Amino acid sequence: MPEISLSQAPAHQRHGSNSGQPLTRRDGVLKVTGAARYAADNHPPGLLYAVLATAAISRGRVAALEIAAAKAHPGVVDVMTPAHKPPLAEDPDAKTNPFMFRLELLQNDQVRYAGQAIAVVIAESLEAATEGAALLAPRYEALPARVGLDGDTSFLPPAVGIGNPAAVTHGDVEAALDAAPLTVEATYETPAQYHNAMEPHAVVAAWDGDRLSVDTPSQGLIMAQGRIAGLFGIAPDHIHIRSPFLGGGFGSKGMISGPQLLGIMAAKLVGRPVKLVLRREQMYGPVGHRAPTRQRLRLGADGEGRLTAIAHHAKTVTSSFDDFYEPAADASHTLYAAPAIATSHEAVRIDIGTPLFMRAPGEATGSIALESAIDEAAHACGMDPLAFRLLNYAEVEPITGKPFSSKALRECYAQGAERFGWAGRPREPRQMRDEDGFLVGWGVGTATFPALMFAAEARAVIRADGTGVMETGAHDMGQGAWTALAQIAADGLGLGIDEVEFRAGTSDLPDAGIAGGSAHTATAGTALHNAGAAVIAKLADLATGDERSPLFGAGNAGVVARGGRLHRRDDQSRSEGYGEILARAGLAEVEARGQGTADPAAQSTYAMHAHGAVFAEVKVDPDLGQVRATRLVGAFAAGRIINPKLARSQLYGGMIWGVSFALHEEAVTDRRSGRILNADLAEYHVPVNADVPSLEAVLVDEHDPHVNALGIKGVGEIGITGSAGAVANAVWHATGVRVRRFPIRIEALI
Ligand code: MOS
């Protein structure tokens, strides 16, 4: 039976009744009542507890461990070390594709960063395992730590699937800078940051022969399943991963991490179920982080304030043994029209865990530098920073010259400025005070994030009772996927959301791709939409080919699905219920699959990005230099919004992370040991309620016929991108001090 193509999809599937509704998240009650079962909440019978022992040095080797002392501790069952561990079918250092990160699975005695696992103690209780790990008292042969951005071993990292590490040029930047009547040159520094999801990485693993059951948080179930299968030499379908809820991921749960795999190894070693949960400080090393950057921006402008050149060079770090880099300079490819643009990257290898995707990797880091430089250029040109951005508005993607698939950024600037009250802003800094004498500043930043599509599959079923089932192994890390995807699923079946059972969160379901790159709703949603269209087409074939049906002869494209019935397009009074169609055909159910993938033709024709404009107010104590973000208004255009309530929540989250980037987060390295000095939530500052300003997120209408069948661009990461720069620019406007090292701290302002 032929599956109908998207262009033939019934009209309702393009304009469903569930999508667009501000539904409250369906898992909300479970979460706030404690009924949601996270990975570490599982206690299978016979469970043992595993605790990592981690390296206190950042380079060298482990010379000795007091294994006998640990084993002698009451309750300790075993100690897993490089000399005593289950065999692996694959070298953890093998790399056959760029997304296969090298792992530390006790393959040898080498230490490549502080916090690396050097042994795993397995015990009858968490306390016994913790005490056993302490008794290992490692002795090391240490080498000097290589830290910071100043190392002299710069190299050009290979691509890891995002960004352009090599120099990318458009036009002659050096000539344009030489000729420009006005130039701005500045260097900005951003710190190392750690994801710090509220839920630590955790695993509960249970083996049954060569079958494995795993409870673990994952942003990419099928990738995790494949990695486990390769390492343990078992068939992927022998591995069942459950990940119904994640307490945040931010990129750190995109690929299964070393510690999660060590938990699975420990279970194999002892032949009993094992739970391993990272302590907070153990999340500063083996599960990825955002690398620090030093970014040099050079802008040229003509006498009217039009940009003639943008040069953006980013230096960053990666680990001594893998190649991920933060593609910060790529932010300059997209945002502002300039006849000449050049971006480039370099990285230094240091003794640290491999950096990873984190909250708008590249865009967040690059845009706080670019947005600061744009602000500096606007001021140098004597222009309002919003007027300067509008003058340099990119009508086509600057680096490629491609048209945008859609771009409602002008409307974002206009609606955001209106809601914020930007019009009254004095151009010079240090002009506004509040009633308490605090300096007040207003700043703007442009938000941008690519509209990506990965690959996903979904399965749709319509049952004889007229209800439906939709399946895809999607991941809800708190963003609301269970709800937004269920809305798309119900629309795909022409049913109400309560008539569809939506199944997600386990590895035995069709591959939903990765919940990352802000592309989960777009990718998994498109798969659900297409699966729905395919199953409806099968029903339509059954009905329109049967002369007993009122739909007989209407043809597959001559019917629409709505309210659990197929209606004749030319005569909507003639219809038949799903249950009646199946009953007459003698079928208990009908099922079909659908894919969600990028359309290569559209991708090669159009530049696809979400956009936004963020306006920030800060107040600065003129004596103490203390900065508070007090008000943020963001207006975002991200194509079709499936659930405005959840989309606003995601944008709020992103905006808070933007405040955090500008004012709070920084991991500090001890230059002697290479250890992170503030590996806890007391000293690694993430915003708490008292740090969060008044937030408003405006959803700007945007219709995009090219990104995917549903017109979805994604809202997961864009919120951070404009917000960080807006806050930084507001601090300058309040104080007249341009801080180029982030986060902005008191000592930079007094
Ligand atoms: Mo995200 S950093 O793509 O999980």
Image (cartoon, rainbow, N blue to C red):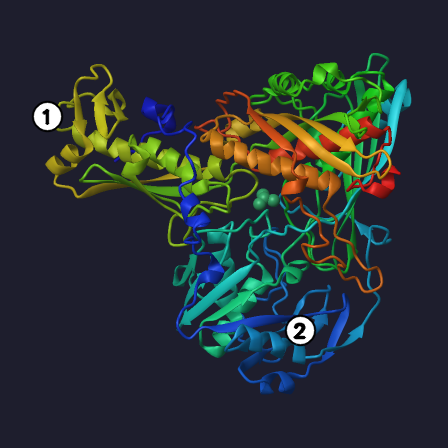
Mark identifier at residue 547? 1
Q: Nearer the viewer, residue 345 or 444?
A: 444
Left or right of 349 in this view: 551:
left
| Helix, strand or loop at mark 2 | loop
Q: Nearer the viewer, residue 706 or 416?
A: 416
What residue is shown at x 62% (from left), y 27% (from top)? 634
Left or right of 136 in this view: 211:
left
Q: Is residue 121 visible?
A: no
Q: Nearer the viewer, residue 676 or 748?
A: 748
Q: Answer above or below: position of 713 versus 138.
A: above
How many numbered badges does the structure rendering display? 2
Quadrant assignment, res 23: top left
Q: Is residue 30 visible?
A: yes
What amino acid does circle 1 point to?
Answer: Glu
Mark identifier at residue 108? 2
What amino acid does circle 2 point to?
Answer: Asn
Quarter holding the C terminus is top right
Residue 725 position, x and y percent, is: 73, 32
